[in-house]
């Protein structure tokens, strides 16, 4: 297996017609099972007047109504703790995880069985093996093992592959950096933000990461993993290649990964998922090369079926032939491009935090940053970027601030951005998903 660039050569290189036939077979099975076992999905399908036997091919997928996060949360609120989505008895579960809910107080809860966890690890194996991780590697997880699902599945995938796992639990950042050096880690897994945080800590400790043994940094949890400027920054500070992955608590695992050829996008694991891209306003499918919202149907999770789940992720799907690796799996160009619902509306101008980060990360003088919005004199929305200056770049800050402001204005329809320097260490650091938008407006504009 280790001699092949593919974890599953048969499916990863399967001709598209055969792959579509395999997906259709799995789709028929998951719909029939969801209808029989899950009260939530029976209501969903009955509401759309869809009988399982009417789902014969991928073309029939659009007959199935969408599942939304709001409906999932509502279901769990009505039938605590897990709703009536489960397709297996609760006592079959061996793991519990949760993620932030839409209400701000009640989390979204998920359960998984032993078979689910076998599948969850398998999907992570596609991504890690595809990026070049092998049994000889020592893989360090900069991750706090708790109810957030994060890199849990990746941990088990590495064990399944035969690689040595170096967990770090609730270690402080300095200790994590020391362990990476002391144990000779060759692969590091973290969010993009935390990878940069560890690099900053390494400099303060006098540890030269580019001269170390780490050759790969695998990131997940933030769209920043596919922003070219952010990737270049991480690669320069670690002296290692950066590979992006993306998953969801709702799915339990990753559904896409960047292969070692780094084609500027991530392959969809299409033998385990069907991914559609729709116009978020109309719900109609869009074609290759068009931006839209990704909708996912999962084949592998037994406890909780997932049918046409609206993720609110913005993506652009392109054919797998765009990559020279030989996989037939389609790609999401640029990975996850942002969120349908994280757009900021500022004086009539659409602002995507991901787009702001792509510009800010081009400036070596900026270490950490935060986007701040406020209401001036009670009537006018303002937006600014607060920046900490990277050590050694203090003399370049004035020029960088002027250029950064011009870049932001030019790329946002002339909208004025304030650029402010703040003291080193004054902005929050993040181990998991970064929250770099501070919206203090009287009335918040949004998607």
Image (cartoon, rainbow, N blue to C red):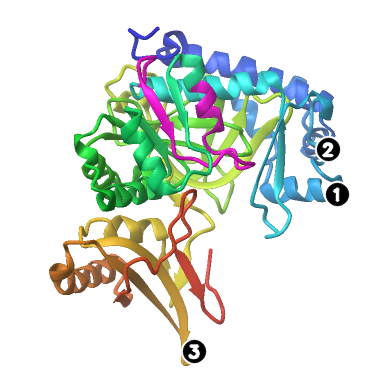
Q: Which mark is residue 84?
A: 2
Q: Which mark is residue 78?
A: 1
Residue at image point 13% right, 70% down? 395
Q: Which residues are magenta?
A: 133-157
Quadrant of res 265:
top left
Q: Which mark is residue 286?
A: none
- Crowding at mark 3 (Cα within 10 Å: few <14, some 14-19, many 20+): few
- Position of residue 68 in the picture relative to residue 2 (left or right): right
Magenta residues: mostly which secondary structure? loop
User: Quick check: 14 above or below 151?
Assistant: above
Residue 272 visible from this viewpoint: no
Of the image marks 3 and 1, the number of the one nearer the N terminus: 1
Discs 2, 1 touching: Cβ within 8 Å: yes
User: Quick check: 164 above or below 230?
Assistant: above
Quadrant of res 162:
top left
Discs 3, 2 touching: Cβ within 8 Å: no
Residue 266 visible from this viewpoint: yes
Quadrant of the rendering where the N terminus is positioned: top left
**Residue extending farthest bottom:** 377
Residue 409 percent location from the top left of the image: 27, 71
Residue 128 percent location from the top left of the image: 41, 24
> Does residue 328 belong to the magenta stretch?
no
Given residues 118 and 211, the one toward you in this image is: 211
């Amino acid at each position: 297996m280790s001699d092949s660039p593919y974890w599953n050569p048969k499916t990863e290189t399967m001709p598209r017609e055969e792959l579509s036939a395999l997906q259709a077979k799995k789709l028929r099975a998951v719909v029939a099972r969801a209808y029989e076992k899950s009260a939530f999905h029976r209501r969903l399908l009955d509401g759309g007047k869809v009988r399982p036997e009417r789902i014969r091919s991928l073309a029939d997928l659009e007959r199935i109504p969408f599942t939304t996060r709001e409906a999932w949360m509502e279901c769990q609120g009505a039938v605590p703790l897990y709703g009536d989505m489960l397709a297996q008895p609760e006592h079959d579960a061996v793991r519990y995880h949760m993620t932030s809910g839409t209400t701000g107080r009640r989390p979204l809860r998920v359960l998984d069985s032993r078979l689910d966890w076998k599948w969850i690890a398998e999907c992570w194996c596609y991504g890690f093996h595809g990026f070049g991780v092998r049994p000889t590697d020592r893989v360090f997880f900069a991750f706090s093992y708790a109810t957030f699902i994060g890199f849990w599945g990746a941990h088990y995938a590495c064990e399944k592959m035969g690689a040595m796992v170096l967990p770090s639990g609730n270690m402080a950042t300095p200790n994590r950096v020391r362990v990476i050096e002391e144990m000779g880690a060759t692969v590091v897994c973290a969010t993009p933000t935390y990878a940069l945080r560890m690099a900053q800590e390494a400099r303060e400790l006098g540890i030269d990461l580019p001269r170390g043994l780490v050759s790969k940094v695998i990131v997940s949890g933030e769209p920043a993993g596919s922003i070219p400027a952010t990737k270049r920054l991480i690669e320069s500070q670690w002296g290692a290649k950066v590979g992006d992955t993306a998953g969801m608590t709702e799915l339990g695992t990753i559904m896409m990964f960047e292969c070692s050829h780094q084609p500027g996008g991530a392959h969809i694991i299409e033998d385990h998922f069907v991914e559609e891209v729709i116009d978020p306003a109309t719900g109609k499918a869009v074609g290759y090369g068009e931006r839209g919202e990704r909708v996912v149907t999962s084949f592998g999770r037994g406890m909780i079926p997932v049918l046409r789940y609206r993720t609110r992720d913005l993506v652009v799907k392109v054919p797998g032939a765009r990559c020279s690796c030989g996989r037939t799996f389609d790609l999401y160009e640029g990975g996850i491009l942002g969120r349908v619902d994280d757009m900021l509306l500022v004086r009539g101008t659409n602002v995507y935090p991901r787009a702001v980060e792509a510009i800010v990360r081009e400036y070596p003088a900026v270490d950490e940053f935060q986007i701040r919005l406020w209401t001036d004199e009670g009537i006018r929305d303002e937006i600014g970027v607060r920046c900490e200056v990277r050590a050694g770049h203090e003399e370049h800050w004035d020029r960088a601030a002027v250029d950064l402001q011009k870049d932001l204005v030019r790329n946002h329809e002339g909208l004025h951005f304030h650029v402010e320097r703040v003291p080193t260490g004054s902005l929050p650091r993040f181990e998991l998903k970064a929250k770099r938008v501070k919206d203090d407006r009287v009335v918040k504009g949004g998607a």
